[in-house]
Amino acid sequence: KQFQTKRKCPKDESMGHRMLSLQATLLFLVQLRAWAAPCGADPCASNAALDLVLGCEIPEYEVDLVNSVGQEIYFKIGGGEMPTLCQSTGVVPNPSWPAGVTYTFTTNGAAVSPTCVPACPKPQQSDGVSAGDSICSLPGDPCNCIWKGGAEHCEAEDLCGYCKPGLRSHMSSDGKTVLCDEATDLSPVYKLDAGSTANIRLAGEAATQRLISDSQPFGWKVFDADVHQQTMIELTLTGGIISPDISLIPSGCDDGPHPGSQWQSNTGWGKIADCGKVPVNQVTPQCPRCADNKISPAFNFGVELNCKGGNSLSCRGPVEGSFGSGGGWPSNCGNPDATCNPKCPQAYFHPRFTPAYGSDAEPSTTCGAGSKLTAKLFAQDA
C-alpha cells in the first residue's frame, strides 16, 4: 500500500503548477497564432482554426441578393477556389477552401440547398464505368473518334454516355486513352425564385469573392464568369468590412493593346485622355475600347448595390449596340471613363488600373464596418 499512496501536494503548490501550465499553454497558442499570421498582419484575422480558442473575433459578412429579374435565377459565390465542389457522390467540401471559413444561404429563414449541374450535358447511357477506368473498349470504340476531324469527328460531350453519372470524359496525355474522371472545376449553384431574397453570410476571412448569377444552372467557377458574359459583383472582404464593385470587363479586353494576340484585343481600350468624352457605346481611332474583342461584355443582369456608409452603385440596361460576339454595353451604367464625382463610372468596363490608361479613379465603394450589402438584380434590358 505504501507504494500505491500518491504524493499529496500542498494546496498552494498544486494551484501554482496548474496556473503555470495554463499560462504556458495559452502562451504557446498565442505564439502559434501569431506565427500562422502573415507578416505585419493581425493574428486574429488570419487563421480561423484558433480564433475560438484565443477569443479572437471571427469577422462576419452579410449580403442580401434580391431577385428582381422577373424569373427564377441561379447564383453562386466564391473566390479562386469555391467552398464546395460537385462530384459523382454529390456536393463535397473543397479541400483547397480556407479552413474554418463558412458560407450559409437562407431564404425566408430556410436553408437553400445547393444544386449540381451534370458534368456531361447528355443523358447517361452506362453506369458500368468507374473513375479512372479506360472506356476505349466499350461499344462504339470512342477512342477512334475523339477530337478527330472530318466525318468521324466527335466532341468530348459525345463520350459522356460512356461515363457513369457525375464523371466526365477525359483524354490521356498520350492521346490514346479516354478516361472517366471526377470533374474538379464544377461547383454547385443556389436557386432563387422570382421576387425572393437570398441572405448570404460568410464567417471568416476569404479575401476577394465574386457573386454571379444566370437564368439556368451552371457549373463553372466564378472566375470564369467573364468568358460566359455574366455580370460580376466583386467583394473585397477585410476585417468585417465589405468593399463592393461591379465588373463588366470582357474576357480579353485590357487597357493597352496586344498586337498579334490570338485572344486578347489587339487595340486595347485606350487612354482616359482620349476616351473621357466619348459616349459609352461609341469608339474613335484614339479610343478603340477593345472593339475588336472576341467576347462581348460580361453583362447578363443589371445590378444595384447599396450599403450603409457607402455610395450606391447602379449598372442597368438596356444594352445598346454590339460588341465582340454579342451585345453592347448597358446604357445606364455611367460613363466608363469618367474621372469620378459627381459622374463616377458605376462599373468596371475595363481594368482601369494600368499606367497606360492614366487614371486612379475606381468605380467601387466601401461599406461601413459591419454593414450589410444589398445587391438587387434586374433583367438585362430593364
Image: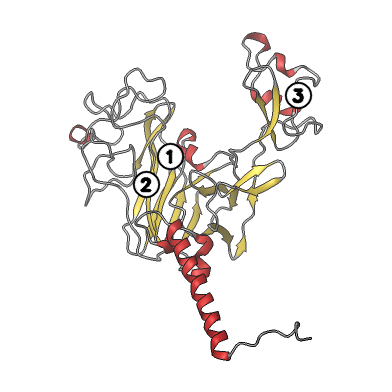
Measured as percent of width and height from the top left, residue 249 is found at 38, 37
Q: CA distance from mark 2 to mark 1?
A: 9 Å
Q: Tell me the amino acid under the disc marked 3.
A: Ile
Residue at the (66%, 32%) spot, across then down: 121
- The quadrant of the picture occupied by the N terminus is bottom right
Q: CA distance from mark 3 to mark 1?
A: 40 Å
What residue is disc 1 on? 299
Residue at the (34%, 52%) spot, across then down: 313
Q: Residue furthest bottom?
A: 11
Mark 3 nearby-residue class (10 Å; few <14, some 14–19, many ≥20): many
What residue is disc 3 on? 135
Measured as percent of width and height from the top left, residue 82 is found at 54, 46
Q: How many marks?
A: 3
User: Up-down: is 152 above or below 184?
Assistant: above
Measured as percent of width and height from the top left, residue 32 is found at 47, 61
**Residues at marks 2 and 1 touching, judged by CB atoms closer than 8 Å:** yes
Asked if residue 231 shows in the view, the reply is yes
Which dot marks residue 315? Answer: 2
Dot placed on the residue nearer the N-terminal end, 2 or 3? 3
- Disc 3, SS: loop
Q: Quadrant of residue 140?
A: top right
Q: Tell me the amino acid under the disc marked 2.
A: Cys
Residue at the (50%, 61%) spot, across then down: 48
Q: Quadrant of residue 139?
A: top right
- Disc 1, SS: loop
Q: Nearer the viewer, residue 95 or 185?
A: 95
